[in-house]
Image: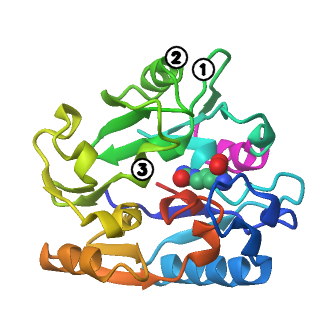
Amino acid sequence: MDPKHAIVRTPGNLYTSCLSEHPLHHTVSLKKAREQHAKYCETLSELGLEVIHVPRDDVFPDSCFVEDNAVVENGKALICRMAKESRRGEQPGVAAVLEGIMPIKWAEDPATIEGGDVVHAKGKLISGLSLRTNLEGVTQMKEWLDVPVATIFDPTIMHLKSYVTYLGKDIMIATEKYANHPALEGFNILIPPSEDEYAADTLSVGDTVLMAAGYDTAQLMVKEAGFDVISMEVSEIQKCDGALTCLSILF
Ligand code: CIR
């Protein structure tokens, strides 16, 4: 089902202190990040989504990455238990908004789970078992949301969606490492060239796919597969180890 709503949250005052291993982290500009975020929100709105803004948070540096705070499926939301201590405390703002719209449940210790690990594809979920999401997190998600969940185990990665996203029409974009994983069986897979791997984190709204600017080959592959592509500048998001999906919860 095509999404109708997008939950977003503007980068807060401490954004430049985000968790990041990106070599250009020290050059992050808050002003530019806010401009890129505003353009992202405007684009989602132009695509017909109701954009719901969670009040800005100036305490938790990574709070604009709302995707990680909750998983929504089947008209319900699981509020995530973040793996990183420095991110625990972002969720109440997002939970307060979701609670007004649908039933919610908080993931509980010993679960850790972050929405950046969870690919939504045709009523089922494919979740990373990663540095951020453990088996207990997946079990609680599966039980509360009442959906089938396939898993991809890779304890070396932060989030699965940095490598695998669902475009629509049974087509996934996935980096070489995951393209033949049994969890993706039944989907047609586009594999971007290694220098374009960052572009595997895509955000689909109907037949339109938002993709990071600067990855022309990956964009062309997606266009040739029959999608409209909107190229987005996300340099200041990338410097905080974020990408397109991280900035919203679509439902
Ligand atoms: C973090 O390390 O948690 C943030 N700096 C980036 C989170 C990106 N979120 C995502 O990929 N879903």
The reply to whether callout 3 and callout 2 are in contact (CB within 8 Å) is no
Corner quadrant of residue 6: bottom right
Q: Residue shown at 58%/77% (left/top)?
A: 235
Disc 1 packing (10 Å; few <14; some 14–19; many ≥20): many
Q: Which residue is mark 1?
A: 111
Q: Which mark is residue 161?
A: 3
- Quarter occupied by the N terminus: bottom left
Disc 3 packing (10 Å; few <14; some 14–19; many ≥20): many
Sequence-first disc among 2 and 1 = 1
Name the residue type under label 1: Ala
Which residue reaches farthest front? 23
Name the residue type under label 3: Lys
Element type where label 1 sits in the image? loop
Q: Is residue 225 left or right of residue 66?
A: left
The reply to whether callout 2 and callout 1 are in contact (CB within 8 Å) is yes
Sequence-first disc among 1 and 3 = 1
Q: Residue shown at 77%/34% (left/top)?
A: 85
